Amino acid sequence: MNNKPSHAHPSALAITDYTYQLPDARIAKYPLTERDTSKLLVYKDGDISQKVFKDLSALLHPNDCLVFNDTRVIHARIHFQRQTGALIEVMCLEPVEPAEVSEAFIRKKSTVWRAMVGNGKRWKMGELLTRNITTETATYQLHVELQEREPDAYIVRFSWDADFTFAEVLDDAGILPLPPYLNRDTEQEDEERYQTVYAQADGSVAAPTAGLHFTKRVFDDLKERQVQSVFVTLHVGAGTFKPVKSDTMQDHEMHKERILVSVNAIEKMCAAADNNRIIAVGTTSLRTIESIYWFGVKLLAQYEMKEFFVGQWEPYELADKTVEVSAALDAVLEWMLKNGKSYLNGYTQVLIAPGYQIRMANALITNFHQPQSTLLLLVAALIGPDWKRVYNYALENNFRFLSFGDSSILFKNS
């Protein structure tokens, strides 16, 4: 069965063509007791079957390369109260001053962030909100001031009167954010279960949920099978839940997310990609490695690049400049060496939708996504119209959906 996507520009796509009926009862509100006992839908060569996630290694071959996103979800939601009694919720999105995530987390005394604000219309410009924080070792005050309103966000300045880093302040004052479609408060169990077991780099407001199924047992099996593991970082923003409200994709602005990838990781992927051996663990991992490829294409096309960035439509605009994966990655490595960079550090805004040809990965491990979402568009780009068969199978066979739901491994159609 050949569902290879066309190479048409996806701007004319109607999001209403990428929908299905998702009953609320099928949304997993809580995780399973054991991560790796979730169902695993297998799509390959047009055939659909199911297994258990802990048996993943049996589906892979020696020298296959799994690419994981090792981002860690932060306690991004912080509640404050105005003197009038009105509650204000500040949801940290990304640092502004300092702009580097790692630097912002070790900052002491103050930092400026871009944020989403609940009840923000009641918050006056320049108004300082204060909250008393009490821990086992200290009592201090955390302040937040509204500095600027943007079309889709707010710029706020945090300050605190204790010798703590902002990471410590968030741990003390913040709440782990759960996806809005779960419609429940964060519970103690979520502190562990809404993080992957390999999470390392603080910075996300949502988990890369395809990775939630992995356990030590699964990693041990993969190692025995001689399957390689490569770790990249994409800090997931709240934009991942941003609904597509426009009739066609040309009027939808894709969210921008920060990427951090080491030279070593790119070198490993270069070797694996040449033999179609890469499996992306999650949509964020796929967006990351595809963005690296297109950055290489831009470099080879003589774009003047001072920093890493791939725009929403650039892959489609550069379609006549495509090169072999190894050539693109070699160009990225050469650029990094020339500029003294041990890490590729920047942003991607790429939209992967039908019309896009996946370059880096042969397969994708992913959960089941919301109707009319950009994540569902990505799945459709990978396997074509068969996404409907996959989702119908999952619904008919009692798979659990969304962040805490079951998993799938989808092999790209040739």
Image: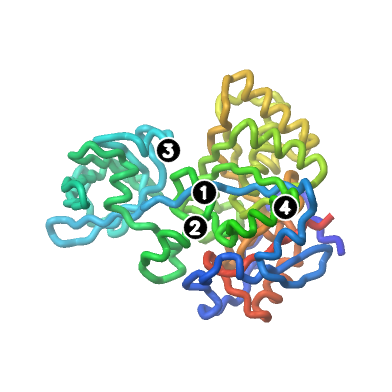
Q: CA distance from mark 1 to mark 2?
A: 8 Å
Give whichever of discs 4 and 2 has the lower sequence position. 4
Cα distance, mark 3 to mark 4?
A: 35 Å
Residue tagged 3: 101
Which amino acid is tagged 1? His
Label 4 sits on what residue type? Glu
Element marked by disc 2: loop
| Label 3 to label 2: alpha-carbon separation | 22 Å
- The residue that mark 1 highlights is 255
Residue name at image x 31 percent, y 44 percent: 168
**Image quarter for residue 413?**
bottom right
Specify the label residue 242 is tagged with: 2
- Left of 195 or right of it: where is 177? left
Name which of mark 1 and mark 4 comes first in the sequence.
4
Q: Is residue 368 above or below residue 75?
A: below
Q: CA gap, disc 4 to disc 2?
A: 40 Å
Image position, residue 290 (x, y; %): 67, 43
Name the colouring of the figure.
Answer: rainbow
